[in-house]
Image: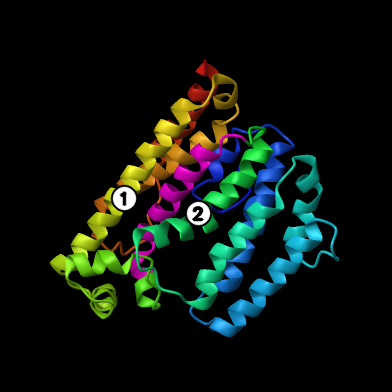
Amino acid sequence: MGWPIRSSFAPAFWLLPEPRRTALIALHRFCRAADEAVDGTATSASAAALRLDGWRHEVCALYGQGALATPEGRALAPFVSRYGMKRPDFETLLDGLSLDARGETLETEDDLARYCLGVAAAPGFLSLSIFGCPEARAYAQRLGLALQMTNILRDAREDLTAGRLYFPLDDLRAAGVSRDEMAAAARSREGEPEGVRRVIERGRSRARDWFAQAETAYAAEPATTRRLLGAARGMHYLYRALLDRVAMESPLPRRRARPSRGQVLSGVLRAWRDTALAG
């Protein structure tokens, strides 16, 4: 059986019963379509902003203000009220995507965290409503930061080559490397300069720290909540394994890393165990 979506998250979705699984798939497709509308090298800032406005109208329509215009919105709409998804979380997602639409640069780690909050933690908050434990926001926040930092590391070469930089300028300054030097290293077929390696290692360290903070937040949740977080735990384990795979590549990976089949199986089983043994 093939996965219902093409994503490193996909195996974790099978830890949810129906119809919650279908709702999570619909949410994932909605968020991904909004992200792809503002991403891509061929998308100008003005065109991306216009497309993002379209998704803002689509969020309004999810809450009865206007007609839905996309298949993703129509697929998600029945689940918004059913599971109590909060409109401010959709707005936080779109605010995060607006950084890509405007092509803004991240100056500090706090700027990076706010970006990750929008594009990764906000979908996590919405997912919590589907899981049935909307109160677990501390876990979803730290996990969202860790997941997005892993994505940034995995896609670093592709993004830098396309002129996109998701590492804070503070990291570059501390490593003594410029944005142009980061981009040149991404285009080069030779080994990365030491400064670039330091930037990447800082990103890896940050991702590991955020995963550890997510683990602490998960442990602090009551057993009644942990029993409902199986899919989130699956995403946690799969992406923690992905971070390890990315670290095995050169600092700027030349191919799109994915967890191995063994890591996928292990991650899903560990997530199922966490749910079964909670409390």
> 47 or 94, which lies in front?
94
The structure residue drawn at horizontal position 75% and vertical position 59%, both measured from the top left corner, is 73
Q: Looking at the rendering, which quadrant does residue 266 occupy?
A: top left
Q: In terms of image quadrants, where is residue 188?
A: bottom left
Q: Position of residue 126 (x, y in %)?
A: 64, 46
Q: Amino acid at mark 1?
A: Arg
Name the residue: 19% across, 61% down. Answer: 198
Residue 33 vs residue 107: left or right?
right
Q: Which mark is residue 272?
A: none
Percent coordinates x, y for residue 56 in the rendering: 70, 67
**Tag 2, which secondary structure?**
helix
Q: Is residue 3 magenta?
A: no
What is the secondary structure assignment of the residue under circle 1?
helix
**Residue 2 in sight:** no
The amino acid at mark 2 is: Leu
Residue occupying the far left of the picture: 194
* Residue position for label 2: 117
Give above or below for 233 relative to 278. below
Write down the residue under mark 1: 206
Q: Which residues are magenta?
A: 135-158
